[in-house]
Amino acid sequence: MPIFTKKPKKTNFVEQITKDQYVENLKNLIKDDSYVKNDILGEEYLEWCIMDWNEGECDFNPKFNIGGYEWEFYLKSYDQCFDINLRNLSIKNNRENHICVKCVLSFCNPKNYSHHNTIYSSLYNCSKYNVDGYCYSINYNEYMKVIKPLIKNNRVMICAYIKVYNNEKNINNLKELIEEDNEKVDEINEENYYEWEIKDWNSLEFNCNNKCSPEFSIAGYNWGIILQPNNKGYISLELINKNSVQFNKDNMYAKFILYIRNCNNYSRLKAENTIFLDCKKNGFQKFIRKTDLYSKKDKNGTSYIENNKIVIGAYVRVFKMEEESILQKTKEQYINKLKNLIEDNSKEDEIVGEGFYEWKIEDWNKLDNDSNSICSPEFIISTYKWEISLYPKGEEEDNYISIYLINKSSISFSIDDMYVKFILYIRNCNDFTSYKADQSVIFLEYQKNGFSQFIKKTDLYDKFGNYNKPIIEDGKAVIGAYIRIYKYKIEEELAAKEEEFVLKKAKEEYINKLKDLVDDDNKIDEVIKENYYEWEIEDWNKLGYRAIKEFSAVGCTWEISLFPEGEEDEKDYVSFYISNKSKNSIFYENDDFNAKFVLFIRNFKNYSSFKAEQIITTTGCIGENYRRIGFSRFIKNSLLYKVNKFYKEPLVDCGKTVVGAYIIIYKNKIEAEEESLQKYKENYLENLKYIINDNKFPSNEMIESGYFEWVIKDLNKTLNAKFDFERCSPEFMIGGHIWKIGMEVDQDNNEYIKIILKNMDIEEKNAEQVWTRCIISFHPYKDYIHYKSKELPLFLFCNSNNGICSKYIHKSSFNKLIETLINDSKIVLDAYLCIYNNNEIVNELTIKENIEENNSKKEEYINQLKNLISDNNTKPGEIIGEGYHEWIIDDWEKLKNESYSQIFEIGSHEW
């Protein structure tokens, strides 16, 4: 992704600035956000002139002091790329102080501060664990585009504005999030934090694999943060101790916080805490919803992800404890893991009770000789009696043991409107990390339920867990159950649940209908992302002239623009547009990515009443600052409130409605055949341009030219369609105007085919006049070699002709025209348009005619003068030269005495 704020500007367009202005501009790029003036330890501007750059192979390693700390920049080049690191040299020996820094780094032309490019850092925490400091990585393409043009005579300026902050307040807030035991606080061995900046979230999000942070060390142990960016709508975060066997042997445990924050401040921060005991990674599978990463809910209106960046961190506090304490904490963590094995969600029925029971087997070998089942003592959880049934040699297969849970109460759960989810497990007597547990099972009736093949008998003696202990050790083991009892919701809630299910199904069908609207004529080799967004509008009448809604989807920020009363002169229609507002995305400047959109409006409670239209975009359409696309006439205002066979309920009901977009991002893998097709298409377009760009018309007054391709799937159906929209192409824009092309059997004389070019902007009153020339061309689908074209004359689109230009072709001629081009009723109609300056074209054509007329008169005048020279009375001889000259006198009255014209030459003599 691009890391520079802007591309270098050309000399003749750059406004000259002084050094003071330049420094002030750099300073203003640093936002203090949540920091107050008292938190600023120091700030300074620095610059260095590199006299011998050599493509980054130079000696650049300056040291300096800011805020009471020593710093350095260090440049390292590799593989036509280079890194510049900002490092704090003092923090290595200082554990207590917590500082952070923001830096704007700028490359500048040595002779002109106006020519520069800048990179700005995130808010970076300095600690002894980040020895490499903050790294600015610059790849080869970025170097060639934005730094190379600034280097003159192998010289370049490197400038920096740096601001250093006291970060004690934010780190103390993190510390307070770690929960302390009320009864006993074990000895703290060491605590510290580590932060990992993700500089390109979008590219990471497309990769479904786990991503691990660089390794860091706290309390003498090596740690890492594991990120899963795509976990069923969530991101997951986990902490892993990479040498945790030693960690446990040292009688250590850790409490830690995993957190995410905005890359520029701590005001947008989410943190969760837990405990670390065994060697396995521990953390949060559903740390945060992916959609919440982009929400702007804090007081500063910032999101977790900003400019495609986010910071992920861990604060780790390591304790040393006694053996009893270790066992107790291990047990607590073990029970929590059992709980988490029971699948649950926020819409679950009411939990009326839960608990666990363990049954200790003192002599497994004695059980192994018994082929029958053996039962645990009865136990009670939530007023119900239970029993665990064990088959040491298996109920069905000898190679497995079987375990079941039995409900010993006399009343079945169905009578009490109850059901149960439970976990069965077996573990080592002395080690909670050495165990086998199966997923939760639902218990509905008065019966036993469990697993006939719970675990292979041979696996009972294999080594498990941190200490590599077997489950059965010295003939002993523990069998247990974790039970959670639910009560069904009341009938009204069940009815609501059923209604919700029906609504969910209707929504799924509705979304599928939207997807079906996407035209698949263009080959989609690989769908990269697709998403669906809805905007619920509570009062349509209060939207005003224009209403906008920003949202995030498929790695970009989008904006819906809605004009309820139509844009500009479209008063009878609703205008509806979508535009990409992302400043940076993985789609920026990537021509391989395309997009398709479906814009829609629907009844707020009925998915079957909706109006939707598709937009097909061109290559590179979703890059930065792409213009809005959509419909000036999306739907007539009058249809919003009507009920008919299409809309079972009105689209706007009691002022409420829903509008939205379905977005598909896809990537075309261009094969050799398609590359060849593209070349044929380019030649084809050049031929159309050649036909239309002759000398009859002033090309310097042409505003814009453009091309549109309309794929007609069924020509006969199109020609004989009942409705206008079925006989016309989708809208397209050329020269700032919206157009359509269409074709039909002429209603006045059905022996003719009428081809229509319509300017959709022309209105009955106050219309802008548009001079246009057009080439229409027919060709087979995806074949640009065989085509037939027709030229339309220069035409003035205005209100008197309703903005319509027509071309009539006799049916016999039309059939001959297309007979070799049509394939299974499918054909393509293209339009190549040239739009001219409305006023100047008439003036220029008139001027040309006047000039031609004047030239003709002047030639006649000179011939008359020439004929006045008589050769009759002179001797015959060779004429060695003749010519004509005029002297224009601007003011006869100002002539005094003799006056002379300018010298002129005729016949090699001056006169």
Image (cartoon, rainbow, N blue to C red):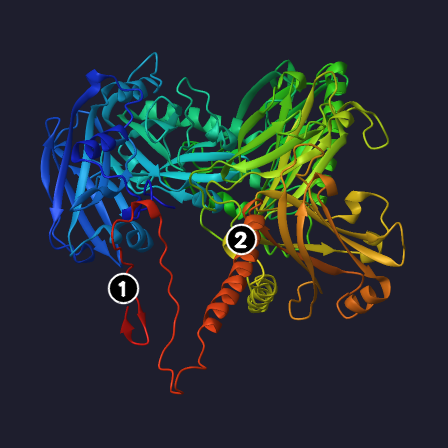
Q: Nearer the viewer, mark 1 or mark 2?
A: 1
Characterize the local packing of mark 1: few (<14), some (14-19) or many (20 or more) Cα atoms within 10 angstroms.
Answer: few
The residue wearing badge 1 is 903
Q: Is residue 544 above or below residue 910?
A: above
In the picture, measured across the screen, residue 744 lies left or right of residue 592, that is right
Give the percent coordinates (x, y) of residue 550.
53, 29
Quadrant of the image occupied by residue 909? bottom left
At numbered mark 2, what does the secondary structure look like: helix, strand or loop? Answer: helix
Determine the CA span between mark 1 and mark 2: 31 Å
Verify CB contact (< 8 Å) between mark 1 and mark 2: no
Q: Residues within 10 Å of mark 2 (few under 14, many from 20)?
A: few
Q: Position of residue 90 (x, y in %)?
A: 12, 33
Amino acid under label 1?
Ile
Please provide percent x and percent y for residue 223. 31, 38
Residue at 16% in and 42% down = 73
Please name the amino acid that badge 2 sits on.
Ile
Which residue is nearer to you in this view: 60 or 26? 26
Residue at 10% from the left image edge and 26% from the top image edge: 68
For this orientation, the residue located farthest to the front is 873
Whether residue 149 can be seen here: yes
Residue 847 badge = 2
Tell me: residue 29, above or below residue 489: below
Per the image, label 1 sits on a secondary structure element best described as loop
Residue 111 falls left or right of residue 431: left
Between 534 and 485, the residue placed more toward the observer is 534
Nearest the eye: 553 or 191? 553
Residue 459 in the image: x percent, y percent?
Answer: 51, 46
Q: Is residue 891 visible?
A: no
